[in-house]
Amino acid sequence: MFPLWLLQTLVIGALVMCSLGVLMLVVFLIVDSRDQQIW
Amino acid sequence: MIVDGGGIILASAPILGATAGYVMLAIFSVLWVGLGIWWGRRAKSYDGFAVAGRNVGLALGTATAVATWITSNTTMLAPQFALQLGIWGALAYSTASFGLFAFAPMSGRIRRLMPHGYTAVEFIRRRYGAAGTIPFLIISLFYALIWLISMSMAGGKLLFILSGIPYSVGMTVVVVVCVLYTLFGGMYAVIGTDFIQSIIILTGLVVVAIAVLIQIDISDVHERLSSHRPMLLSIAFPAAVMALFNNLLFGFGEIFHSNVWWSRAFAMRDGVGPKAYALGGLLWLPVPVVAGFLGLAAPALGIGISQPDTVGPLVAATLLGYTGALLVFVVIFCSLASSIDSLLAATSDLMVNDIIEPLRGGSMPDPDKRWWSMASIITLGVLAWTVAFQNIGTLATVLLFAGPMVGSCIWPIVGGLYFRRASTVAASSAMILGSAAGLTAYYVIGWFVASLVGATVSGVVFAIGMIFWPDSFDFRSLAAPPPGSGDEAEGTEATTAPPQPATGS
């Protein structure tokens, strides 16, 4: 049976990764726009 | 929402009012179409319209990989997988991100090998000839149409569940809006809106999951599952483990063969593709786990689900009420739009470059190709609407039917990109026999082994074909524009360039 700690790690870890993902996309956009490399 | 005497909540009635649904639909429809027109001004040539000028940067490249792969199926089927197959179900769905990781190096090679390319079918045609093109084109079109129709159906179904907007109206609006902004802006509009959509989807998922976690603890979910549905926590759940491998191969097949991903590889600036696809995979990986948690939470919350593929949105909307329903509505609409627009753009490229242009017997000028692209987008929209209007079959059944077929394309694509020995006989027989075996397994055993069987049989046949009927392909020939395209002077220069590294040859 999957232990509780594994379920907690999966859910919380996934939430953190999604949040960091949003942050990462915004940072990339800023960097790309500074270098005029969006398109 | 109805609460019965036993404490089970049957989330069957729409939580968001129809008026709110129509207002949200109107706001986002105007936004997407407006952005489509705005970005469409950049698309002055066919290259601009079809592959966004081949100069897309890392931010938009990463976002488009994430947004396109987060379909409404991710937000609907991942919770369903978790509800029916437990933790393994959510993990199985996450393995679809491995396709993005694996495609990352391939996207760089595709961009280098075919600097003037437009479609995956064009690669197969120039690599394997007509015998390889016919089965591949059939599989590509079948898959693209099934995906397009299932997304359109999901649109109508979800908008009805969330807001009570009639299925036919919701589905029609989703299809028409996506057709309109793809029509005006081509790949510029598709990739541009994908960035906004990916931010909205990821943020929305995080907010919904946090709001659910505020109302219920993970340990409560674990305890409830342990006592009432222990199979969902079982490490040895044979069907779920099979689903994991099946989903992995389905994801590989979907991404490797589909022009949705090839067209993005052509659209990204040189060197961006591998980074964008790898980061896109990393961002996508946790999404089914977050969405799947909603499915696992349903039994613990005592929410009775009449339609398993709507468990995620229903849990969120039931727990979070009006605000939650609004948020889910937006996330779902973005998930739908980001996939439908990609399919319309990429499939219209297939129709123009791989069906219409060859049938017309030569190269078409830019304005003609642009006109045919727009006609193809409208045709695809009408076709999807017509079939989706019938509202037949469940989402999982319709989409998983394509699994064994795309699974049988994995080896012909990988072999064709990296091995000189990969031949027409090997590729075409691998696709045909792999699809036949996979579809047989689908009917005889079940969907959870279909892709596995298709990919395995295809791999064995492909290996035998390479051994007994080898080719000696010159990868440099792919760098030239297609014969008769009018760019052959540039192509001559390309063919005299240093040879591309061909690993495995």
Image (cartoon, helix red, strand yellow):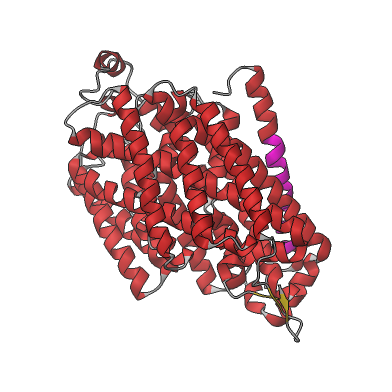
Q: Residue at x 75, y 51 (%)?
A: B207
Percent across and percent down for residue B290 are 67, 56
Which quadrant is the C terminus of chain B positioned in? Answer: top left
Quadrant position of residue B451: bottom left
Residue A32 among those drawn in magenta: no
Q: Is residue B63 above or below residue B69?
A: above
Q: Residue at x 45, y 58 (%)?
A: B150
Percent across and percent down for residue A26 are 69, 32
Would residue B296 appear left or right of B390 to someone viewing this image?
right
User: Where does the magenta region start and end?
Assistant: A6-24
Q: Residue at x 38, y 42 (%)?
A: B378
Which quadrant is the N terminus of chain B positioned in? Answer: bottom right
Would residue B463 appear left or right of B181 to someone viewing this image?
left
Quadrant position of residue B126: top left
Q: Residue at x 65, y 29 (%)?
A: A28
Residue B328 appearing in the image: no
Q: Is residue B135 above or below residue B313?
A: above
Percent across and percent down for residue B4 are 73, 83
Provide the major secondary structure of the magenta segment: helix
